[in-house]
Every structure is written in C-alpha cells, then in structure tokens.
Amino acid sequence: MNKTFEIKLERTLKAKNYTEGKLYVNGVFFCHTIEDVVRAKAGFWSKLVKVYAQTAIPYGRYPVLVTWSNRFKRMLTGVFAVPDFEGIRIHSGTSELSSAGCIIVSYKKSITGRLVLDAAAMNDLCNMVTEAQKEMKCYITIVDKV
C-alpha cells in the first residue's frame, strides 16, 4: 500500500511580524497556526533571506516524523529536510515569539496574530503522526491560501 499521511499548512495571512495559517490533516481542517515571517516567495528560497529564529520555513513538501526533541525533552512532530533549517517542530505556543522557525498550533485563536495556549492540538497531531508513521510515509506541504 502506497498511501501517505498528508498534512497541509495553508498560509492565510502574512503580517509584518508573523504568519497565520490553517493546518489540514488528510484534507480535513485540523487547527490554526502561527509562524514567523515568510521571507521568500514559493520557489525562490535563498538562505540569504533567512533571519535566524525569525523566519518561516520555505514553501514546499517535507517529510514529517515524531522523534525525540532535545529542546522540549519529549517526543514531538518534526519537519525534516528543510533547506537551511534544523530542529523544526510543530508545537504549542501563542505567537511567533513561541517559534524559532517552528510551526505553532492551537485549536483556538485568541485575536489576530495570537493563538490560545493549548497543548491539545500539538498532542493530538503527535499521536496521529505516531500511528501513521508505523505504516506509511508522512508529509507536510506548505502553500499559500488559493
């Protein structure tokens, strides 16, 4: 069976200091996201535009796995093979300040540019990917809202 587990991050609002989005799992809305600033258009990534810990990962499709995070001291969903980035995780937080290139997730938005601090979305996604990776490859695709 060649089935894959697909996560899609649809970037919906690009502000001066942050990027809002929506996360879909196998085509179904899952939760809200906040990331750092998008600094390159799709297909035009250059490490020269990266500002350490203040840049959203480039558009594209990347493998996703649940692995041990030394920073968070727990198993977490990681995004791998991202050009010029290391240690990218999908975790909880409230704003781009919670991120160092990571994808921040929550079931609830607070106000524009802020999420409600809630570990449920992070934990639920982690559990879903943990189960899926036993039988199939898991990916995240990052796109703009069409």
Image (cartoon, helix red, strand yellow):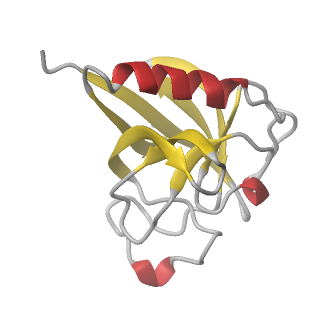
Q: Residue at x 72, y 64 (%)?
A: 16
Quarter of the image where one finds residue 133? top left
Quarter of the image where one finds residue 135? top left
Quarter of the image where one finds residue 136? top left
Residue 70 in the image: x percent, y percent? 58, 55
In the image, residue 90 sits, relative to residue 37, either above or below, namely: above
Q: Residue at x 64, y 70 (%)?
A: 53
Residue 28 in the image: x percent, y percent? 48, 16
Image quadrant in which the N terminus is located:
top left
In the image, residue 34 sits, relative to residue 99, either above or below, namely: above
Image quadrant in which the C terminus is located:
top left
Q: Residue at x 84, y 33 (%)?
A: 116
Outermost residue, left side = 1
Pick the front one: 42 or 81? 81
Viewed as shown, does residue 36 lie left or right of 47? right
Q: How many numbered discs, if any?
A: 0
Q: Residue at x 34, y 51 (%)?
A: 60
Outermost residue, bottom side = 48
Viewed as shown, does residue 20 lie left or right of 64? right
Pick the front one: 124 or 22? 124
Outermost residue, right side = 111
- Residue 26 visible somewhere in the drawing: no
Residue 14 in the image: x percent, y percent? 64, 54
- Residue 47 visible somewhere in the drawing: yes
Pick the front one: 68 or 46? 68
Residue 128 in the image: x percent, y percent? 48, 20
